[in-house]
Amino acid sequence: MRHLLLFGMMISILFFAACKQVKKNDNPFFSEYQTPFGVPPFDKIDTSHFYPAFLEGMKQQVSEIEAIVNNQQDPTFENTVLAFG
């Protein structure tokens, strides 16, 4: 199962690598949504916006996992499982 997830992530990265690069300033995923109910501004989203957003999201997830792994306290439900969620 883990290998399938990794394979899917690699395919996604390769697919989105073909998309043109977009500056963070132009990417609606990197700003607060100024829309009713806080929904994404679908009219401003282009396929080229997804790849940088996925990379940033994965970077943030890795950072959160590293914080859990490097925690010097004794493992507890709160500082492992809940911190991961």
Image (cartoon, rainbow, N blue to C red):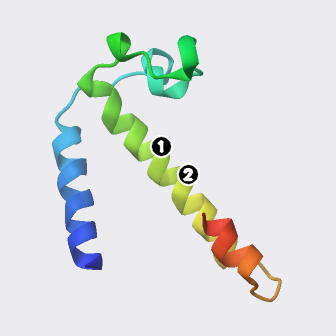
CA separation in Å, label 1 and label 2? 6 Å
Residue that sits furthest to the front in the current view:
37
**Could you tell me which quadrant the N terminus lies in?**
bottom left
Q: Which residue is mark 1?
A: 56
Q: Position of residue 59 (x, y in %)?
A: 50, 52
Q: Position of residue 55 (x, y in %)?
A: 41, 45
Name the secondary structure under disc 2.
Answer: helix
Q: Amino acid at mark 1?
A: Glu
Task: Give the crowd class for mark 2: few <14, some 14-19, many >=20 residues within 10 Å.
Answer: few
Task: Determine the image quadrant of residue 82.
Answer: bottom right
Q: Which mark is residue 33?
A: none
Taking the spot 80% from the left edge, 89% from the top edge, the residue there is: 74
Of 29 and 22, the residue lying toward us: 29
Q: Amino acid at mark 2?
A: Gln
Name the secondary structure under disc 1.
Answer: helix
Q: Position of residue 70 (x, y in %)?
A: 70, 77
Task: Determine the image quadrant of residue 49.
Answer: top left
Taking the spot 22% from the left edge, 50% from the top edge, the residue there is: 12
Tell me if 50 is positioned left or right of 4 in this view.
right
Q: Which residue is mark 2?
A: 60
From what the image shows, is residue 39 above or below residue 57?
Answer: above
| Observer able to see residue 8 | yes
From what the image shows, is residue 18 above or below residue 61?
Answer: above
Taking the spot 16% from the left edge, 36% from the top edge, the residue there is: 18
| Observer able to see residue 21 | no
Task: Determine the image quadrant of residue 17.
Answer: top left
Please report contact status of discs 1 and 2: CB closer than 8 Å, yes or no.
yes
